[in-house]
Amino acid sequence: MKRIRLQRWSGSVLSPRTRPCRVQHPRKLTARLQSSASSVAQVESPDDSDAPVSTQLSELELRNLPSPPPSLATSSAKLSALHARLSLPPRFPIQTLARCLIDSSADSSLSFNNTSLSYLGNDLFGYYTTEAILCRYPRLPMAVIFAAMWAYTGPKTLATLCREWGVDAAAEPGGEVDPGYLQAKRTPAGNAPIVEGSGIVRKALGVEKKKSKPWNRGLSSQSIKDNYFGEERRTEADLAERPELRGSAKEKVVTLEVASVNFVKAVMGAVYLHGGRKAAKLFFKEHILSRQLDVGKLFEFHQPTRDLSRLCAREGFESPVARILSETGRASRHPVFVVGVFSGKDKLGEGAGGSLDEARIKATIAALKGWYLYSPMSVMVPSDAEGEDGKLWQPVLVDGGEVIV
């Protein structure tokens, strides 16, 4: 019997994932080093052109890099697994995914960190989330819209999403670390914020109490001047007036939550750049809008009866009147009253409680939620009409706004 030589036909039998291959490299190695003089950037001989990256860059030279070079991305099993786990489009380069994992605290160069991609992803998240909420619930108050935005794309949600993707963070960033790890200089332990009234208050220098908002910081100012969550956006003019907001000139460090949020936003921006508008919207629907959010639990009414009266007066309805629908056990220890709120012959809401006041307030809150949580049957967002193959735009309901009391 003849001995079979596997080297001749093993390439056709083995799958592309397990097939042994050699990484092709250009004649000149364009690895970025911090030092100005390096012998690695010299022209290589033809015999060394097919050598792996690990032999071209020594361990000491990799340690001098603030982040892994892009050429190591193709040899990382963690990156390939993450790319497949997220179902990213084939046009999404694995080198770009490796760049999304590099935070600006690990590498300050804008050509290698994820700062630009994170900015783009932040705007895309805000745009797609805002249009989805406003077109689905056109009568929501601004405070509830900010809360819904926070629930969908807030820091806690995106950090949880990053953990669900199975992304691990490196203990310390560097060129010798696997590109599949999240690279960031993390805040050292022991810097937790002070929580008053918790029983244990840690005294720290330079920590000031939270100041109250100025008189011009209302909902109108938050919807125009602030970010997508109604938080204060610090401009250059604000930083010039208050230099202490810029922080100290020490080395930049971030928490793991901030680094995870920047990574998720960078992936969203990279999907838009490499996959296009359709791929970005599909990615957003699968990972963000697929989460269930009970918008009704985001409401908080302080004086619901007054709000309902003003709402009926603004819309031209009759003044609301509370009426008892049914009751049981009035003379017992646990009575139950069912009260309905009517505007003329139309019942606006219904509520049950252990007392007449409790049932009346619950019925009033149900009436207000029935108005604010109105949702049309067919919802079309502005991004559906974008592009040459976009749908014909159908106008959506534009409400008069929340009740001002």
Image (spheres, grey):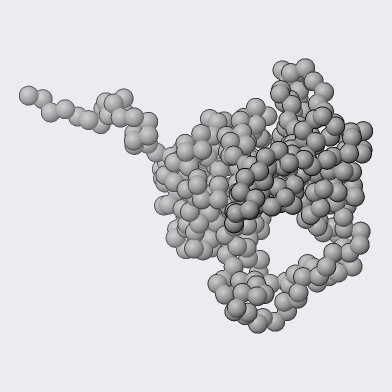
Q: How many marks?
A: 0
Give residue 272's position: percent from left, percent from top: 66, 35
In the displayed structure image, the side of residue 347 where residue 269 appears, left or right: left
For this view, does 356 lie left or right of residue 261? Answer: right
Judging depth in this view, the residue of 347 and 236 nearest the camera is 347
**Residue 369 visible somewhere in the drawing:** no
Residue in view at x 68 percent, y 72 percent: 250
Is residue 159 among what the camera can see?
Answer: yes
The residue positioned farthest toward the left in the image shown: 1
In percent of width and height, residue 160 lies at 55, 50
Residue at x 70%, y 47% (from the top left corner): 359
Q: Looking at the picture, how far across and down is residue 46, in whole percent? A: 44, 41
Classify residue 210 by image quadrant: bottom right
Q: What residue lies at 57% left-to-right and 75% top-to-bottom? A: 190
- Is 212 or 103 nearer to us in this picture? 212
Q: In which quadrant will I find the N terminus? A: top left
Residue 348 picture location, percent across and down? 77, 35
Q: Residue at x 69, y 52 (%)?
A: 355
State which quadrant residue 237 falls in.
bottom right
Q: In the figure, is residue 16 to the left or right of 168?
A: left
Against 20, residue 29 (above or below) is below
Left or right of 314 on screen, residue 200: left
> Looking at the image, which is closer to me, 234 or 115?
234
Most extreme residue toward the front is 331
